[in-house]
Amino acid sequence: MFAFEPVPRNLDVLRRNISARSLDGVVQPVDKAVSNEPGTIEMVIYRDSDSHGMHAVPGAVIEARVSVECVTLDSFLNGAKVDVIKLDIEGHDERALRGMSRTISGSTPLVLFAELAPAYLRRAGTDPREYVELIRNFGFTIHLIDERARQLRPFTLDELARLEQNSSAYMNMYCVKPPR
């Protein structure tokens, strides 16, 4: 299992958690960002948050900007099949999905846990409806995780419209791609 974390401070916390839970050899931390193309990208490091990202949040106090290496999941995994992907990249999610298209296409069944944060997606230059459509085009059925009710519910465009009305609103999605 791989856990990608490009921010040094967060990577240190990840490594300590892996060790504290005796998961060395089970979870392999990777100090890179996942994107749609290899290279480097600038990460914004916030003073009062651990939710650092590639796209600055208006009004947030920026502590630093660091360059990090990016990889595509397709090139990193080199054709390996996966069962589960957890994706929460503060708006950069659509680009990461595009960089794992072969991995997704070659992996069934597959579960994708992904954040749906319209304001973050828009800040990254992604239309939230196009992001949802991309996930559907990969063959996933999308459900929303209702944290309060502790249950799944079907995703609807009405739910997306509701989320878009609040700049801090988000939901987590449970997306399933069945076996062929």
Image (spheres, rainbow, N blue to C red):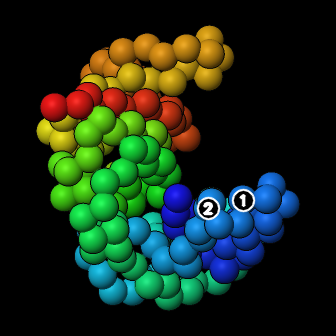
Mark yes or no: residue 143 visible: yes
Tell me the distance, in whole angstroms, between the alpha carbons under discs 2 and 1: 6 Å
Looking at the rendered structure, the secondary structure element under dot 2 is loop
- The residue identified by callout 1 is 23
- The residue at 30%/35% (across/down) is 109
- Considering depth in this image, is 135 or 130 the residue closer to the camera? 135
Is residue 28 shown above or below 32?
above
- Considering depth in this image, is 131 or 46 the residue closer to the camera? 131
Is residue 26 shown above or below 110?
below
- The residue at 26%/28% (across/down) is 178
- The residue at 20%/51% (across/down) is 106
- Considering depth in this image, is 49 or 152 the residue closer to the camera? 152
Percent of width and height locating residue 150: 62, 16
Percent of width and height locating residue 155: 34, 20
Question: In the rendering, which numbered label is found on residue 27?
Answer: 2
- Say which amino acid is labelled 1: Leu
